[in-house]
Image (cartoon, grey):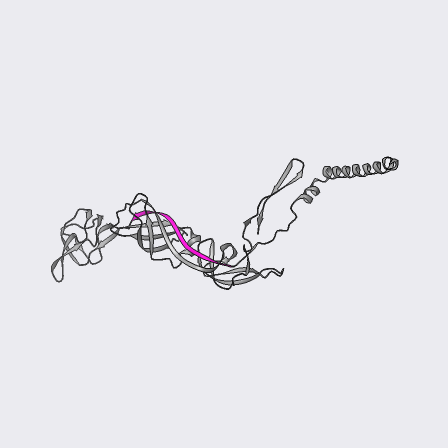
Amino acid sequence: MVVWRRWILPILLVIILGACAAGLVKLAFFPEAQAAAMGPGAEITDPVMPVERGSVINELSLSGNVARDNAYPVRSEVNGTVTAVHVGGGAVAAGRVLFTVKQDDPVRNIDIVAPEAGDLSEIAVIKGQQVSVGGDVVTLSPARYHLVAAVEPVQLYRLVNAPAEATVSITGGPAPFACTGVQVQVTAEGGASVQCSIPAEQTVFAGLPAQMDLALGQVEDALVIPVTAVQGGSGSGVVWVDAGDGEDPQERTVTLGVSDGTTVEVVEGLEEGEMVRQFVPGFVAPVEEYCYEIEPGVEQCESGMSW
């Protein structure tokens, strides 16, 4: 007992106090090393995921406005002299007689009529005036309407082989109805829009906001992967396949089908169960924030991007 109190206990106390002193010195003069030791030690790896079966519904909803169809000139179909002007502008019905022209050869009177209902403007003839075939006689704004919706250029690939018909919904207006003649338009400046013709029986007004819904395709029980795994996307692309042997993922060309902007169908090039890299090289994916204590009462958080 005397040996324990005189020798062993003092030696143990010296060792413990020495260890504590060394720790305090390290914490005081080498905080970076301490933080590194306490920080996350796992390596950043590229996440992979299996090729699975699923459904893809490619639907696109666009916001737009109702607009009146563009005005166009009504042209004379004969050579002759205007003998009567029957309108002074304003609204006309389809088939309304606009002018009467006395044809030169053979001599006869011919009525020029409104090809469709609309509003007249810019009447370019008067009684006694000579007109010729193809000459503009009046401008007609047809009583027809269409819906035009802006679309992001990046979505244009989704609109390849777009259907000829869309569904239109107008807040406070009639029940959703079919809008025909869907057209995708791209300007020289790079702006893009989708337009469709509103049926004549629908009562609408220029400027009304409306929504255009396009059903672009649907597949069931198909091989699917996230679009982030594909470099490309319209018809074909490249994915990185991980064989699970520790080697770098290998590039593979695949044939693609329907996409909803998040998931894409793989028609050819992959088998169910194969592992593919979730993000293509260069794709910025968020990394979950990780927080740890660097010293008592002080916490440090790290987050970043995986490339």
As drawn, the residue found furthest toward the front would be: 1
Give the main secondary structure of the magenta stretch. strand
Residue toward you, 60 or 131: 60
Above or below for 246 versus 40: below
Please report the bounds of the magenta region as a residue range: 51-68
Residue 178 on image: x %, y % = 31, 53
Residue 255 on image: x %, y % = 48, 63
Residue 295 on image: x %, y % = 67, 37
In the rendered structure, does residue 58 fall within the stretch colored magenta? yes
Q: What residue do we see at 83% from left, 37% from top?
A: 9
Quarter residue 182 falls in: bottom left
Lateral position of residue 147 relative to residue 218, left or right: left
As drawn, the residue found furthest toward the bottom would be: 268
Q: Quadrant of the N terminus?
A: top right
Lateral position of residue 57 relative to residue 287, left or right: left
Residue toward you, 27 or 108: 27
Residue toward you, 239 or 187: 239
Q: What residue do we see at 74% from left, 37% from top?
A: 24
In the rendered structure, does residue 63 fall within the stretch colored magenta? yes
Quarter residue 251 falls in: bottom right
Lateral position of residue 302 relative to residue 107, left or right: right
Q: What residue do we see at 32% from left, 53% from top?
A: 196
As drawn, the residue found furthest toward the left would be: 108
Residue 153 on image: x %, y % = 43, 52
